[in-house]
Image: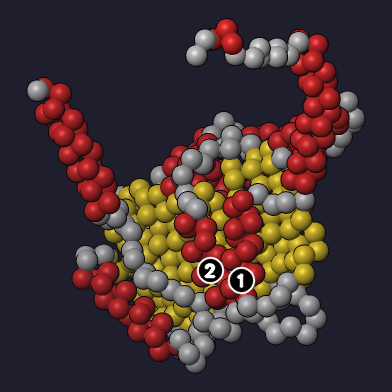
Amino acid sequence: MNPSSLPPVPRRSAGCLWLWGFLAAPLLLLVVLAAGVASCFRLGSDARALRNELIKSSGVEWRQQIALNAGCLTLGAVRAGLSCVKLDPGARAALQSVRNAGVGVYQLPSGTPPPDRAAMLAAADTAMTARGWERVVGVIDGQDLVTVYMPGKDVSSHRVKCCVTVFDGSEMVLVSAQANLEPLVEYALNQPGLRAQARRLTQR
Amino acid sequence: MQTMIRYPLTIAVLVAGVGFNVLADPPPGQVDFGKIAPVPGGEFVEIQIKSNLLSLAAQVVEKQDPDAARLLRSVQLVHVNVVGLTDENRTEMEKRVRQIRHDLDAQGWEHNVVVQEKDGQDVGIYTKTRGGEALAGLAITVIEPKNEVVLINIVGDIRPEQVAALGEKLDIKPLKDVGAALKDAAPKK
């Protein structure tokens, strides 16, 4: 076949591409914005896995009261926004420490029989261990269940992650956070009296 | 040819390394309390602070309090178990504690303090020494027949007088109490 007999391929002009770009940019921005907003109401993957296992193992229906998540972009924006505002030093230290935080609150409908907390703890352990987390604290006392999980590896004061669950028999609060502890600890240790107390304890 | 030899050799060394790591014995001061599961209606507390968290705590206080950091770095593991006794698990838990004590005796741990109160409370404090003065491990078993069983294991390179300070640092009450007991039991200089 003679190549010269092929129909000419239409070439898009640069102006046309600019037009497409101009039209797509707001749409893309909107999608990114929508995803960002949606992520504010969705817990992180580890916290979601923990919540799902706790709920599944309890064998009862839970009502989600709230689920909020603030990632590094949101928290960075908050930090930048509040940088000119006069804040309590403790609050500022806390704000500087937290890199990512999520909280979920779930409630049992009234009249629901109390779920088996031992089974919930065992299921949570299985789910979190599979994801490389270790249970640091587990407490079952009366109606209460408290768990604290931290990653088994890669723990440093610059990057501490933890997942905490507190269930009081009717309401379960799940908090996950990632933080750089140094600003907070520096603030705490600079409080008058605290350093002297710490020294006294080690010299006992 | 050299490459053909080198790669399998490297892989063999790596596999052996992983194997040895997996099969590596736990530190001499570590005690295996076995799997303790909570029972319905019974109290259950488990705290397990490993060396990664302890060194994190040490990192955090390093600048401000080097003594505390040194203390935290000398510990590899703090494991506390409190299990409430119910009709369902009382016999099994008491039997398990006796078995743990028997195993510790058999493994050459020193049985330092035995307290058997009139109300049936039974406390055993066992130590595994490293050299003359430091402890490689500390194990405490407490049976309170009406209430609970408490099992504590601290692993590291620790001096007895540091145990109370460690309890204060980590805010673990049984450790504070044991620290005080060890201090009282220590020979006066």
**What type is the residue that disc 1 sits on?**
Lys
- Quadrant housing residue B97: bottom left
In this view, the residue in front, A151 or A131, is: A131
Horizontal relation, residue B9 to residue A57: left or right: left
Instruction: Tell me residue B157's x, y (percent).
Output: 35, 48
In this view, the residue in front, B149 or B158, is: B149
Above or below for A191 versus B82: above
Assign a secondary structure to mark 2. Answer: helix
Above or below for B93 versus B169: below
Above or below for A142 versus A204: below
Q: Say which of marks 1 and 2 sits in front.
A: 1
Q: Residue furthest bottom?
A: B87
Residue A98 visible, this orientation: no
Q: Are marks 1 and 2 in contact (CB under 8 Å)?
A: yes
Say few, some or many: other residues with alpha carbon within 10 Å of mark 2 (under 14 / 14 to 19 / 20 or more): many
Per the image, the residue denoted by label 2 is A123
In this view, the residue in front, B71 or A11, is: A11
Q: Which mark is residue A74?
A: none
- Quadrant housing residue A32: top right
Look at 72% across and 62% down and name the residue there: A173
Per the image, the residue denoted by label 1 is A56
> Which of marks 2 and 1 precedes in the sequence?
1
